[in-house]
Amino acid sequence: EAGVTQFPSHSVIEKGQTVTLRCDPISGHDNLYWYRRVMGKEIKFLLHFVKESKQDESGMPNNRFLAERTGGTYSTLKVQPAELEDSGVYFCASSRGQGRRPEAFFGQGTRLTVV
Amino acid sequence: ELKVEQNPLFLSMQEGKNYTIYCNYSTTSDRLYWYRQDPGKSLESLFVLLSNGAVKQEGRLMASLDTKARLSTLHITAAVHDLSATYFCAVFTFYGGATNKLIFGTGTLLAVQP
């Protein structure tokens, strides 16, 4: 069974540009999460999808971040326009259905550097 | 708001030595995870601790949970170089079918020196 995969693994962009990160969850997993780790700090929750619906987006930093999960399969996280403080590692995780505290499986992360 | 504090942030230790990483959290939770991350790799789940007094061991790593003290420890016995990685604790928050998510500590970068 394929794990959670993220693309790209690294991205270097200039301030003001747009970047789109992609996450392919494990097949059949309804829950999809985005997290971010800024240099040296904790991994912070960004948002949670259940299928194609946003269940919780309380961790999204501001309106420059837009997450989508069309059709309830893969998800994209777009940053537009990118700022220097957006640099960090963005992790995606997926898990099975609700209600039983399912274990989340993580992707390898996308390292975003804004210069 | 649930907060998770992990220390130390960085740990350099010699092979063969023992050490403990600490994880404190601020509110009640019924599930605590320890993860390992190697550079450029995904977070690998090491242990999940579900109840007060839970202790789990895998090789040279042993994790324990004290829910009354809101403290978990990850003990490393006779460290070897292969254990070098970043270790995270994470507490699961669950709101009865609504949102659920992991709250992570800052991570401990472990470097085992020969």
Image: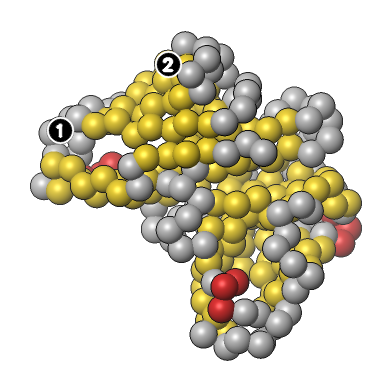
Q: Position of residue A49 (x, y in %)?
A: 80, 50
Instruction: Identify residue for label 1.
Output: B17
Q: Is residue A51 above or below residue B21?
A: below
Left or right: B19, with B5 as reference point: left
Q: Quadrant of residue A69?
A: bottom right
Which of the pair B7/A35 is nearer the observer?
A: B7
Left or right: B27, with B23 as reference point: right
Residue B55 image label: 2
Q: Image point 84% across, 35% down: which residue?
A: B98
Chain identifier of the residue bearing label 1 in the image: B
Q: Is residue A90 above or below residue A80?
A: above
- Looking at the rendered structure, the number of numbered marks drawn on it comes to 2
Which of the pair A56/A76 is nearer the observer?
A: A56
- Tag 2: amino acid: Val
- Tag 1: amino acid: Lys
Q: Would residue A112 be seen by someone viewing this image from the given angle?
A: no
| Circle 1: element type | loop
Q: Would residue B18 be seen by someone viewing this image from the given angle?
A: yes
Q: Image point 74% across, 37% down: which residue?
A: B100
Q: Quadrant of residue A50?
A: top right
Q: Image point 80% across, 44% down: which residue?
A: A30
Judge the density around disc 1: few (<14), some (14-19), many (≥20) Cα neighbours within 10 Å. Answer: few
Q: Image point 68% across, 33% down: which residue?
A: B93
- Colour scheme: secondary structure
Left or right: A21, with B10 as reference point: right
